Amino acid sequence: MDLDKLLSILTIDRLILIGAILLFLSYIAANLYTDIKYRRTSNLKHAVSLVAGLCFFNYMHEGSFIILIVMLISLIFGLILEKMKSSSPGDTKMFVVMSVWIASFAPENLIQQSLMFCIVTYAFQLLFAWVSWIKKKGFKNALREQKEQVIMLLTPGAPLGKEIIFENWPGAVNMCLGAILTLLAGGLLI
């Protein structure tokens, strides 16, 4: 391939898309590393990546305020997971940032892509929580406690149990798996 052909392929739009993909992948890699190794993520990384994601979203979907709905959906899912003691505040921040990026890459059905990401990530979180609960308490006790947790979650003002479902499972892993499956299902990685 000669240089002229390569330069004709690399338009500004494609370069911006490549840069955005590299930025998103570096955000995921950095959070996976720090969440697995130190069980912490950086607020600065979340803030910078959120601003970059919002700028990229505005470039891809100019004048669209649907991103506010996407952020609200992911925030609600993140807070539910926090209330159920199966994630931390850093995971909720990462949830919002990754939802913004996934919506940015989606050409259409932005809310559907965001909901799919939230549901897939939530399913991974519940799957790993169930495995952990069954290991700790056995199947019947885990089922009974899960039923109690759901009842308390749906009862306004009721305190949830103080038991943390799993202490050493990094939420970045669930979100990374959820993002990959969502982008594959939406045809965005193909």
Image (cartoon, rainbow, N blue to C red):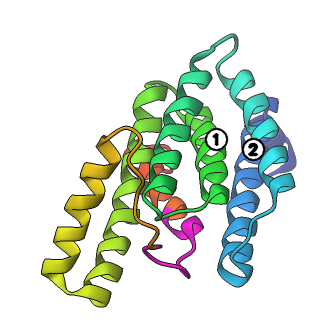
Where does residue 49 sit, x and y in percent of width and height?
78, 46
Q: Is residue 10 visible?
A: no
Q: Taken as a whole, is the magenta stretch helix, strand or loop? A: loop
Q: Which mark is residue 20?
A: 2
The one of 147 and 52 positioned closer to us in this rendering: 147
At which x and y percent is residue 115?
A: 41, 37
Hey, what amino acid is under mark 1? Trp
The span from disc 1 to disc 2 (Cα, nearest Å) is: 9 Å
Callout count: 2
- On the picture, is 89 further left or further right than 58? left
Residue drawn where x is 56% and y is 82% of the image = 168
Q: Residue at x 39, y 42 (%)?
A: 116
Which amino acid type is shown beneath numbered disc 2?
A: Ala
Q: Secondary structure at mark 2?
A: helix
Left or right: 164, with 145 as reference point: right
Read off the magenta span.
164-174
Disc assigned to residue 101: 1
Is residue 66 something that shows in the picture?
A: yes
Residue 161 percent coordinates (x, y) = 40, 65
- Helix, strand, or loop for circle 1? helix
Q: Nearer the viewer, mark 1 or mark 2?
A: 1
Looking at the image, residue 52 lies above or below residue 119: above
Magenta residue check for 5: no
Q: Residue at x 74, y 74 (%)?
A: 34
